Image: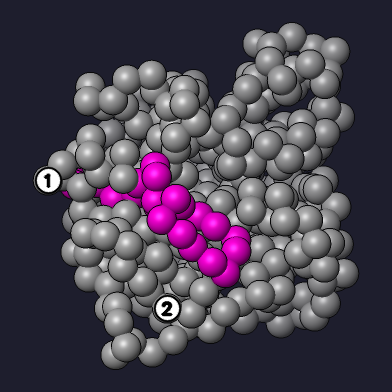
Amino acid sequence: MNITLYNRFTEATLHEALQDTPVVLIHGSRQCGKTTLTQLIGRQLGYHYISFDDDNQLQAAKADPVGFIQSLPEKTILDEIQRTPELFTSIKASVDQNRKPGRFILTGSANVLLLPQLADSLAGRMEIIHLRPLAHCEIANQQPTFIEQVFNAGFCTGSNQNPYPRLGESLAECICQGGYPAAIARSTAKRRTAWYKDYITTIIQRDVQDISSIKNLDILPKLLALAASQTARLFNAADLASRFSISRPTIREYLALLEQIFLIEQLQPWHSNRLSRLIKTPKMHLADTGLACTLLGVNSKTLWQDKALLSQLLETFIYQELRKYADWHDEPLAFYHFRNKDKVEVDIIIEQGRELAGIEIKASATVTQSDFKGLNKLKEACGEHFAAGVVFYDGENILPFGERLFAVPISVLTP
């Protein structure tokens, strides 16, 4: 099977970091493309490559961390660094002796910043880049402009705009495909599902045990499937714990492990003194909708028929696409959700400095003024700091729904 080499938009950020930072860490879930990207950069810039998936290299590094680092060329890639946390102290010592930029490129399939061995961290010596599965704009090799448009309220409306395609059933296909390069390379949906099933088994049996001596390993696949059913919903550890004969603290510990290996993430609630009765519970999102569909046992046909699940997974799909855009954006962005006790909500809030944009998501082809209820509430609360509000829908045109409020076709994100 030949896997297409996609142009990863993170590459420009990596090049910039190597110009002024001694250590660059690229972390993200296994098989999202870290090794491919670093090997490409390594060949261009003359880096020596070592993978700790090679057991000989792994054992050598663990046996003599200081000697291992001292023996390396000045420019080295260390792949799957989470398997050898013993090396961080030696990397720190080496960098303190020679702070030349671009000395080490590290990759990790677990969030090494959460490892206890990194208490004395590489702060000030290391830049961290989060690589996620492929975005649809990367697959199409088209630079995204949505973030810039939403913060400039720069959407073209009216008769002069070219219509966007309605996605219809292909929307379910986009969601089920996911963003992992090796899965996308599979020729059929059946073979893609087989890849995801193998992926789940491998990552739990291997990566989890690299970072934790977990006892009930067989619970993790079931917990991950349950998490998939709760994607885009408020996080409730008690509800998840009730399905298993283990305590709530243990469930939280297991969920933290899944978060540490980038399979799930929490979207924190947005707060404002101008609004009362706010829900302070985070939302949970799966890292990839192709993975979620496999865990839930749905394909594009059955997903299209289940409109409630389609809407739920579409929210996660758009959230993850926007998170990928944020990784390439020039300004730092923060993501939240908003809901109050009257069930007025905004699916995604994006903050850029003091400005804020709201995103609502619909799977249908129609949009009405009532769909902007949460965005209008947010707009009132934020005043001049409100950049724009968008309702994504499966339509053809960008439509104005008031000052700085727009209905935007989902296909804007799927060129």
- Looking at the rendered structure, the secondary structure element under dot 2 is loop
Q: Which residues are magenta?
A: 353-375
Queried whether the magenta region covers residue 367, the answer comes back as yes
Which residue is at 80% across, 80% downward? 187
The residue beneath circle 2 is 397
Which residue is at 50% across, 55% downward? 361
Q: Nearer the viewer, residue 147 or 5?
A: 147
**Which scheme is used to colour this image of the protein?**
one colour
Work out whether 363 lies above or below 259.
Answer: below
Label tally: 2
Please report whichever mark, 1 or 2, sits nearer to the chain's N-terminal start: 1
Residue 384 image label: 1
Residue 58 image label: none
- Looking at the rendered structure, the secondary structure element under dot 1 is helix
Q: In the shown orientation, is residue 96 left or right of residue 33?
A: left
Q: Quadrant of the N terminus?
A: bottom right
**Quarter occupied by residue 124:** top left
